[in-house]
Structure formats: C-alpha cells, structure tokens
Amino acid sequence: MSEMIDRAGGGGSKYHPYTLADSQRILGPQAQALRNTARALDEKLRADHVVFEVKLLPNYLANSYFPEKLIRLLGLTALGSRSATGDLVLRSRTEVDVPTKSLIVAGDNHSLEWLTHILSGSALDRREKGVAEELRRFSNIHLPRVAEVVKGATNAGAEHAKEREAFEAVLHPDPDLPGISRRPLSGAVFEKFERYIRSLGGEVVSDRRDVVGGLTFVPVFLPSGKAKEAAAFNPLRSIRKMPRIRPVPALPLRSAPGVSQPAPPPAEPDAPEVLIFDAGVDVAGDFFAGSVNQVDLTEKPAFPGCIEHGSAVTGAILYGNVDAGSRLQSPQVRVTHFRCIPGHDNDGVELYWLLEQIQKRVADSDAMIVNLSLGPEVPVDDGESHRWTAVLDALAYERDILFVVAAGNNGEETDEGGNRVQVPADMANGLSVGACDRPHPEMMWSRPPYSAVGPGRPGATVQPTVLAYGGDAERPFARLMGNGRLSYDWGTSYAAPLAAHGLAKLSTQLGDRCSASALRAFAIHFAEPHADPSLMLESGHGRIPVDYSNALVCSDRQVTVLYQASIERDQILGFTLPVPGGIDRGKVKVKWTISYASPTDPTEAVEYTESGLEFTLRPHSEVYSFRDPENPRRTVKVNIQEDADRVADLREEGWKMSQQPSTRSQKVGPKASESSRRRGGKWETIMQGQDCLMAKGLHLPRLDIEFLTREGGLLTRNSPPVDFSLVVTVESLSGLPVYELAKVDFPVLSELPVPVPVRLRT
C-alpha cells in the first residue's frame, strides 16, 4: 500500500533581516574583542584553536543555512551547538525570546584575525564576500560564558572549603581538526586538562573516561568552590556536580493482605523476556519462582527496602496492576532482574559503573524491552545531552531495543526546570513513562503532582511520552512481593514497569511484526489523551492501556492498519490510507502515528536527532491546486475528473497545476509539521496527527513520508535508510461498516495472527 512519489518544487524568496553593513556594525566589535581575548588566553587553558560561539538569528535554523563557506574558508572547526534564544525578525514584526541555537566553533589566531578583517568594513574579495553573506545570519559572537559551562549548584559556600566534591566534566571534540569534528579530544589537550585540574587541588579520574559521539565524559574531584575556575579551561563544554542515583525507599513500607494463594504456574520458557535493572528481587517467592532470573552485579548487601522496590517493579512487569485478594494468572513474560543497587563503593563514579553494566548486559541479550526505574537524579538540560541519554539512545537505535524509563518523581520541585523529566527519560529513542492517579480504564484520571513534566529535549519534545498508573497518597500502588503479600507506595518507578508489562504482552500478539518502533507506535496511538489538550507537556500523549487486546480487535465502523517500511534518504513514500470507496457519507476520522529510531549526536544539543521524517496528508487523489500566474499567493482547488472544463479554462489562462494532489495542513506543534520542527531546530522520532473530514472529501487518501538526514548541523546525503512503523486508524462517525469494506477494497491487508477473545453479537 505504498508507492514512490516524485518530489514537487516550491519555496519562495528568503527574507534577510540584516544587511552586510548591519552585520559589520553589530558583529565587528565583538570579533575584535574575541580576537584580543583569545590572544591573551594562557596556553595551559587552550588548544591551538580557541573554542567560541556564534548565535544564529531564529530566521536561519534550517540546516540548509549551515555556514559551510565560513567554516571552510577560515579553517574553523564545528564542534556542536547549544540552545539559545533570540529575536525573530520578520517583514512586519519582531518576536523576542524565540528559541534558536549557538553554533560552537573553534579557530586559531589566524582564523580570528581573518574573521575580524571580514567584519571590519574593508574591501573584500569574492570568497570573503560569500562568507560575509553567511555572517548576516548571526547576532552574537563570544567566548563560552561561565554560566553556560557550569551547570547547576556547585556548593561554592560550603563550610569545609577543602572538602572535595565529585563532578562530571564534558570536553568538546578535538578543536584542532578543521571541518565538522567529532574526533575525541587529543591526548595532549586532555593532559593539559589533567594538569590544570591538579593545579586547582583536584583530580581527574582518567581510567573512567568515556567518549560518546566525540564528547569526552570524565569524573573530576574538585575542592568546593572550584568549579567556576575549572570552567576557564577553554575546550571544556560543561561541568556539573556528579548526580546520585535516584533513591529507592530506605525502609519497608506498610503491608496489607496479599493476593490469593497458591501462586499460578510460571511463565512459559518461550515467553518474551524483559530486562530490569533495579535493587534486587525475592526470587525464592512462589509468585516469582520460575519466571524470574536474578543476576547480582554487586556483592554488597541490599539496604532495607531495596528488595521491596525491586520486587514491586518485577511484580508489575509479570502481573500488571494487582488487587488484594485477586487470583493471578500465569505470567505471559519472563524477567531477568539485574541487582545493581547498591552498587560501586565510590559515589563519584557509581553512575559510570552502572551505565557500563547496563550497556554490557543489554548488548549480550536478545530481549527487546528494558525497564529502567532508576537513573541519575538530574532533570533534562536543554543545553546539554547527558551521557546516560546519549549512550542508551545509541544502543536503542543500533539494537532495536525499547527502553521503558520512569520519568522521575521530581514534579513538585520549585527550582527552574527542576520538575522536568529526569535522564535518561529524555531519550529520543525510548519511552518515558510518567504516573497517573487512576488505573486504566477508570475515568477522571490526572497526573499526580510528584510525576515529572516536560518538555523533553529536542527530538523528544513531548515528555513524558505517556502515563501509566503509579498511584498517589489517596490511592497508592499495590506492590507485589514474591510471597504474594502486598505493600503500598506510589511513584513513576511503578508506572514504568506497568507500561512494560502491557508492551511485553503486545510483543507476542504482534508476532514477527514486532519491533521497538512498532511497540512505541502502538503505545502512543492507543493512549487516551488528557481531556485538557493544554496539559500535553505534563501528560504526554496520554494514559496507555495495560492490555492491548481490545485495541487489536476493530469495531465494525473502524479499521486499524500497521504499516512497516524502510525509506531511503531523499525518498518520498506515499502510503494509501485504508479508506474504502463505500464510505460515501457522513464524517470520517483518520488518525496516524509514526515512530522510528534515529542516530543521535550528543554534541548537537539543539539538533540531537540526525534523521527526520516529514509527513504530508493528501486527502483526495483527484483534487489538485492551481496557482494564479499573476498572483502566486492565490490558489484554487479543483477536482480534475469532475470539473474537466474548468481545468481546461485554467490551463488556457496560464494557471499552473500542482504536481501532486492538494495537501491538507495540520496543526503546528511538537508532533506536527516540518516547519515547526525546523523552526525549533529539531526532528521528532514520534509524530502523530489526526483529521476529521467529510466522506465526500476523501478518495484514495495518501500520507506522504519524506526522509532527511543531517550531521553536525549540515544536511547529508549518503545516509543509511531508516525503518519506521506507521499505525493508522480510520473510523466512520456515521457508523458505516469500514472494517468489512476495507477487507474487500484492500485485499493485500492481512489480519494479525493474534489470539483474541471471541465476542458474541446479539
């Protein structure tokens, strides 16, 4: 049900807010100050090239505006980007504090001298004029500011000034390699960093150094109050206090009567496997025996409450949401539980040890679903991607793995940004799960205040992705222990495994059609949106079901189709939507969800995802647009079959017919049009849209999907294809038999071979 689509031309002239004279007047003094400061910079604080930043006007966020001539002619190194805000200058108005980005680049003394010359107003040669045109896109040039490098509180006023604190330092890719550099920092420059940190009384834990996407992550110990001095090292991208692992309950919680005895039979050996990284589990309990395999990653004994937390997470994945006195059915999933809390003895490197364990164990497994109810206790940062997020996003992309991650219980934090989802729940290729206060399918649910909110990072703006029941003080979550007893608590730590439970069962129902992108698409497509659309950045795409069996059984008046495809760079695929010809009256609702995994670039905080899909809805295959030759902004839509005479008249008058059927624009937002994604400098790995049209306005409707790629802020061509899943539901609001008609009109469709309950109709 797909076809290759020819690319249509288009696009008008670009409005440029600044003239060359404007740029020389604004940027010239800044370039001179940068040149002078760089010359005076101590050699022990820099590489041969000095790192600096140039802020783009929001008018130029599209990757086609990357300053390639500037980079090439001046011999600069492009190192990534940071988020920023600026003034969007339009023909008729100016919008202030609009999201934009600062490009992080590096140049030697000669490069900075040349930049100063171009902006000085002197006579320029042909090549320099081309660079000057690109400089019109910038509003500011400066060295990295301490406030941008030092992240979060640093305890500068601590009583014990000599007491050392653990930090995580992130160093840029090698600034001395001209072009788009993603090579890690050279050994010589890293040794400079070590010497400088020692001069401050600190220590770099070099044996824990890790390189992710060209960035060097390394633990650093510093005396209190020295972080800002450390930020003077020019190739340092950021430094933040080393976060701790999200805490688990320290003491056992109040218990209550358990579920009915005896325990059901264990899961079948061929049941899908879910990996858990948590605080341990009571594997000897009858309700876990035979279904759970525990692997100890630490020899340290568990603290009180740890086993309860790990068992609660495990029980939710095996059995879902349970009630006191209920009789449980045999689990349909198996669990491998890696006990990793408490972990390494040294708090400063515990997060490094734990992430390494997750990487190794996931890579050695064939499991598709991994539950993480733990992670660093730090919220998403728009300016920087975290090591945990970058590593797990790469793992998810490379191995087709779905990380189901608890969003965090910091929703009531009052510090700016402190209530946002915690890493790695900001993954672009994962599924972050917040909590709601009522289990599915009960009505009148809401997000409890403790559950972390969005927005997420670029590429995954809608965060948390979904909500699942996590309980609250009035109605806490029932946590199952291995012996069948229950204890009560609440948190996103329990919402995430409840979501993983439903998705693991869905994986068996999808059979050989199952993939990580298909599971994400189903979770979002069948999520129940919050009644208030304005709360999307708190509630995500909505509350997901615990069981997808009902979703897999279409009613008479609707049909849901799962499309799975691979698309090449610059290719446009058109997917025929399953609207049968017999739907000839009333309104028709069409809803679609697209999910895919993208390679990511942690150096590009603003353009984190490197792959982008753009969709276009064409509702009627015979309706085309005609453009007035004298007024290009004036268009009319004509059915070329039903109104052939008018088509002939328009052609005779010089009107130009569109190459493809007319489009129907979608609402602008984080899950909608490409224009909004370009303006925000980001491409989302989950996109959703819906429309309600009169049946007469639909005829072989088509959803066109285009694939673009970028690297280092520059559009690229020779990129590997991307696999994606598309879920579409067509529903007749007039009660017409869509399902049976679709089976006739689209015989290529086959029903999923899923076990579904028999439904008797009376």
Image: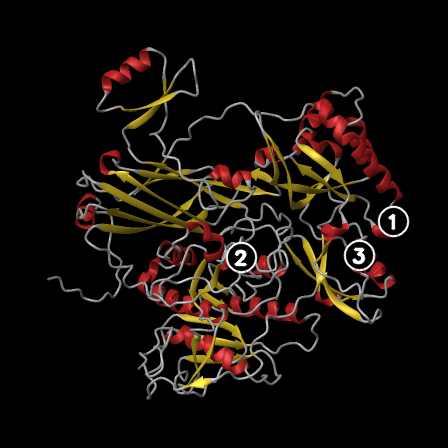
Front tag of 1 and 2: 2
Please give the name of the residue rendered at 45% of the width and 76% of the height, measured from the top-left corner: 314
Tell me which numbered mark, 3 or 1, is placed earlier along the sequence.
1
Instruction: Check the image and report above or below for 307 versus 351.
Output: below
Residue 498 figure quarter? bottom left
x and y percent of residue 165 in the render? 76, 68
Q: The C terminus lies in which quarter of the figure?
A: bottom left
- Identify the amino acid type marked 3: Lys
x and y percent of residue 102 in the render? 67, 42
Position of 499 with respect to 166 (left or right) is: left
Q: What element carries label 2?
A: loop
Front tag of 3 and 1: 3
Q: Residues within 10 Å of mark 2 (few under 14, many from 20)?
A: many
Alpha-carbon span between mark 2 and mark 3 = 29 Å
Q: Residues within 10 Å of mark 3 (few under 14, many from 20)?
A: some
Colouring used for the render? secondary structure
Residue to which mark 1 is pinned: 43
Instruction: Check the image and report above or below for 478 versus 17.
Output: below
Residue to which mark 2 is pinned: 427
Q: Can you see residue 127?
A: no
x and y percent of residue 345 in the render? 68, 78
- Viewer-nearest residue: 255 or 295: 255
Q: How crowded is mark 1: few (under 14 residues within 10 Å), some or many (20 or more)?
A: few
Please give the name of the residue rendered at 49% of the width and 37% of the height, measured from the top-left corner: 675
Alpha-carbon span between mark 1 and mark 2 = 38 Å
Please give the name of the residue rendered at 42% of the width and 13% of the height, measured from the top-left corner: 630
- Identify the amino acid type marked 1: Glu
Tell me which numbered mark, 1 or 2, is placed earlier along the sequence.
1
Position of 590 with respect to 281 (left or right) is: left
Residue to which mark 3 is pinned: 228
x and y percent of residue 428 in the render? 52, 54
Residues marked 1 and 2 touching at CB (< 8 Å): no
